[in-house]
Amino acid sequence: MYSQISSNIWKSYALVLFFVAFIIGLGYVFARVTPFPWILPLAAVIAIAGSIGSYYYSDQIVLSMSNAHPATTEENAHLVNSVEGIAIAAGLPAPRIFVVDDPSPNAFATGRDPKHAVICVTTGLMEKLNRVELEGVIGHEMSHIKDYDIRLMTMVVVLAGTVVLMSDWMLRSMWFGGRRSDSDEEGGMGGILAILAIVLAILAPIAATLIQLSISRKREFLADSEGALLTRYPAGLADALEKISSDDEPLAAANKATAHLYIVSPLKEDGLINSLFSTHPPIEERIRRLRSM
C-alpha cells in the first residue's frame, strides 16, 4: 500500500510534467507552421495554468460537471454515518460527501489528498443498495483516497481535456489561418513540420485517452481488494458491483472525461472496440476476485 501511495505521488508529478511538455511542444510546432507565432507563449501559459488548476481545483471542476451538491445529515444520515465509519476504519479524516440527483446507481471519489477528499454518490445508489453493499462501495472509494489515486485520476480529467481542446484549436488555426510564408520558403522542412503538426493534433486526443485508460484500469482491482479489507465483507462489494453494472438507468452526468472516476463505468460499452477502450476492467473479473477472497 505504501509503495502504491509513493508511486501515485510521483506519477502525479510526472503526469503534470508530461502534459506541460506535450502542450508546449504542440504550441512550438504550430507556431512554426502557422502565421500565429503567439501560439507558443499562449500554449505555455495554458499548460502551466492547466497544471496548477488541475492540482487545486480539479475536484471542484468534476463536482460541477457532475451537478453534485453537498450531502446533509438531515437528508442523508445513513450515507454520512457509513462514510464516517469507514473513514475511521481506514484511519483517514472523513471526506466531504456529495450527492448527484440521479436514479442510476454509481459513485466516485475525487480530491488531491486525504485531507481534501470528496466521496460522491448518486441518489440511485442509496436507493438501490442495502447497507452492506453501500459500505462496500464506500470502502472502495475510501481506498482510492488512501492510495492517492484520487489526485492522479482527477488531474487527468483536466489535463487530458486541456490537450484535446488545445489540439482541436491548433488544428483549426492551421486550416483557417494557413501556413507561414517563411515556412513555405523552408521547402521540405516546412512541409515536414506541417505534416507533423497535423499528426500531433490528431493523435493528441488519442494519447490523452490511452493515458486515462492506463491510469484507471489497474487501480480498480487494488481498490476492490483494499475496500473489502476495510469492511471485512467482500461479498458486499461484489453484490454492489452486480447491481450497479446490471442497472439500465443511464447516468445523465456521465461523459468520457469523468467516466474513469466512477466505481463502474457509467457509459455503455458494447462491442469489441468499445471494450478495448473501456476505462474499467471487466466487471465479471472484479466480482470473481472478490468472491474468491
Image: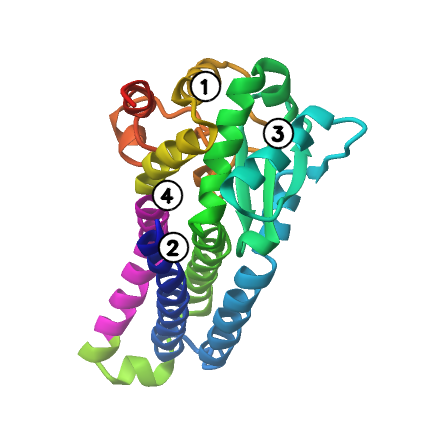
Query: Which SS class for mark 3?
Result: helix
Circle 1 residue: 236
Q: In this view, does 81 lie above or below 287?
A: below
| Mark 2 / mark 1, whichever is N-terminal | 2
Expressed as whole percent of the image width and height from the top left, the position of residue 75 reads 78, 26
Residue 83: say if magenta. Answer: no
Q: Give the range drawn in magenta.
A: 191-215
Circle 4 residue: 216
Which secondary structure is most common in the magenta stretch? helix
Q: Distance of mark 2 from mark 1, alpha carbons?
A: 25 Å
Q: What residue type is labelled 3?
A: Ser
Other residues around mark 1 within 10 Å, as few (<14) / some (14–19) / many (≥20): many
Query: Which SS class for mark 2?
Result: helix
The answer to whether any part of residue 68 appears in the image is yes
Residue that extends furthest to the right in the rendered view of this protein: 74
> Which residue is depicted at the point 62% across and 20% down?
124
Circle 2 residue: 5
Number of marks in the rendered image: 4
Q: Which of 187 and 207 is in front in this view?
A: 207
